[in-house]
Image (cartoon, rainbow, N blue to C red):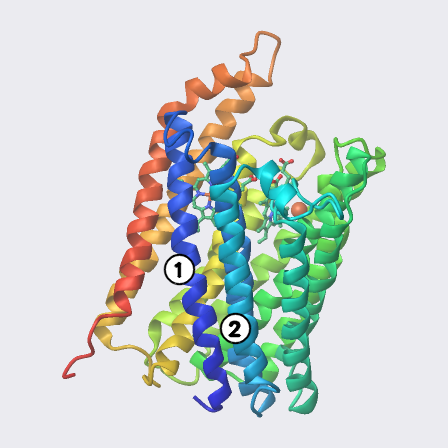
Amino acid sequence: MKYSSQMVAKNYFIFALILLAGEVLFGLILGTQYISGDFLFPEIPFNVARMVHTNLLIVLILFGFMGAAYYLVPEESERELWSPWLAKVTFWIFAAAGVATILGYLLVPYATLAELTYNNLLPTMGREFLEQPTITKIGIVIVALSFILNIGMTVLKGRKTVITVVLLTGLLGLAVFFLFAFYVPDNLVLDKFFWWYVVHLWVEGVWELILGAILAFVLIKVTGVDREHIDKWLYLIIAMTLISGIVGTGHHFFYIGTPDYWLWIGSIASAVEPLPFFMMILYAFTMAKQRRIDHDNKIALTWAKGTAVMAFLGAGVLGFLHTLAPVNFFTHGTQLTAAHGHLSFFGAYIMILFTIISYAMPIMRGRVHGNGVKAQKVELASFWMMVIGMLGITSALVIAGTMQVFLQRVGVDVLSFMDTQAEIIPVYTVRLLFGLMTLAGLLAYFYSFFVKEEGK
Ligand code: HEM
Ligand code: HEM
Ligand SMILES: [Fe+2]
């Protein structure tokens, strides 16, 4: 490790992985409830489990991004972190607030949680992904500001690279768009309209910049390819992302009460969105081919290539599947949406965290050349188990969604929502089995940390 302050990233990475285990566990609870509705009722109702599942996902990605930034920014900027102390303190504040919020979801009814946290003073609760009590949201803003101050000062005072500039832009965007979580208009159409300013402009806008920057950093390290070469790709990908992604928000404004012109704008702009994801595949594989060094940490490169491919499949292919207005008319809010949500979040934002963790963690643990051969073998097995598990979950959901559309939405003699769900239960059983495989893969990943190196 070049700079001792990079070490602060370790806690962030470990905590992100623990939250990921919780997320997958709650996914399995949800998957079981789809088959047997009374499972764990009344202790953990579906709506609560869902909230815990998705909120853990968001929070773990935030922890992962912070860890990634704290690790790579000092190295890129060629100086110590502006304030390692601040980074350590914010970790504990954020971790405590996160745990308290999840416990709040699980231990008291949501309405009571709203009352206890004085939601009436500034109502922001109750929207998907943004269910956190207002006070937690304020905490997130404070943590984000201190984090950006720390990263920003390090970047400004040190060497500026394309990677750090892109990363910082992404992080600033992340913080700015989160502010829309505080704007909850009474009008339901406006409410939904601005809700997407957080959700869409995060995942299909500024988070993609963060993803691109982390991917570029790891690729430079493990391939030894010239920075100038990688920078050109990064510029191109980022430009394509922003051009298509910002206007592409229109694909959420088709049938929610917004004007008709969104049908055209949303369809056309978002149809371009798969391109930057496709370019990431070309970029990762070209770099791997042109590599100048044979880094001993082979698995980090595997994760990097895997991220590019899976993000393209989840976001690019499954996203495109329902992004044209005439298709979305039938598929909106079905299991096809869930299929896309799972593979895109996993392929892009969970896998990029595995990429940076697999590169950085061995170094932080004193293994500068990466883990030993045996540990990397276990990690490779975990890679495939998780990738196949998530592909299995999403394939099942694509089948479930297609059945749902045809049974419930096409023609006149259609089934009700619940009758349709009953027909799909066999497919949900397959989903659950692949979910178990994903969990097994994650456990194998954890185990790889404890594999002893030969001769030690
Ligand atoms: C890292 C892995 C996972 C990620 C990234 C993930 C992500 C997500 C996301 C983004 C949603 C919201 C989807 C939407 O609104 O369309 C969701 C909901 C859900 N997830 Fe996961 N999930 C993961 C693992 C699992 C597993 C292993 C299972 C079960 C086997 C599962 C089952 C569910 C269910 C049943 C829902 C609720 C869908 C609904 O409301 O109908 N998830 N997950
Ligand atoms: C990594 C990037 C992406 C992530 C993490 C992501 C995630 C999600 C999630 C979780 C939802 C469900 C939200 C909800 O209603 O609860 C969603 C919806 C949607 N996504 Fe994405 N997405 C990504 C990229 C894309 C791309 C590139 C496209 C188009 C090419 C796309 C098209 C759509 C559409 C059309 C919907 C609305 C589905 C509906 O009407 O039910 N997404 N996305
Ligand atoms: Fe979107």
Q: Quadrant of residue 116?
A: top right
Q: Position of residue 226 (x, y in %)?
A: 54, 85
- Callout 1 crowding tier (Cα within 10 Å): few <14, some 14–19, many ≥20: few
The structure residue drawn at horizontal position 52% and vertical position 23%, both measured from the top left corner, is 404
| Badge 2 element | helix
**Decide: marks 2, 1 in contact (CB < 8 A)?**
no
Q: Nearer the viewer, mark 2 or mark 1?
A: 1
Label 1: which residue? Answer: 18
Label drawn at residue 68? 2
Q: On the rendered structure, is 331 left or right of 421? A: right
- The quadrant in which the C terminus is found is bottom left
- The quadrant in which the N terminus is found is bottom left
Q: Position of residue 352 (x, y in %)?
A: 49, 64
Q: On the rendered structure, is 315 left or right of 204? A: left
Which one is nearer the viewer's eye here, 168 or 280? 168
Residue 380 can be seen in this image: no
Q: Position of residue 297 (x, y in %)?
A: 34, 77
Q: Which of the two labelled residues, at mark 2 and mark 1, occupies the earlier sequence position?
A: 1
Q: Quadrant of residue 113?
A: top right
Ligand 2 image-quadrant field: top right
- Look at label 1 and name its amino acid: Ile
The structure residue drawn at horizontal position 51% and vertical position 27%, both measured from the top left corner, is 402
Q: On the rendered structure, is 373 left or right of 418? A: left
Label drawn at residue 238? none
| Alpha carbon separation for disc pair 2 and 1 | 16 Å
The structure residue drawn at horizontal position 65% and vertical position 42%, both measured from the top left corner, is 115
Which one is nearer the viewer's eye here, 412 or 81? 81
**Outermost residue, left direction?**
455
- Look at label 2 and name its amino acid: Ala
Residue 390 can be seen in this image: yes
The structure residue drawn at horizontal position 78% and vertical position 48%, both measured from the top left corner, is 183
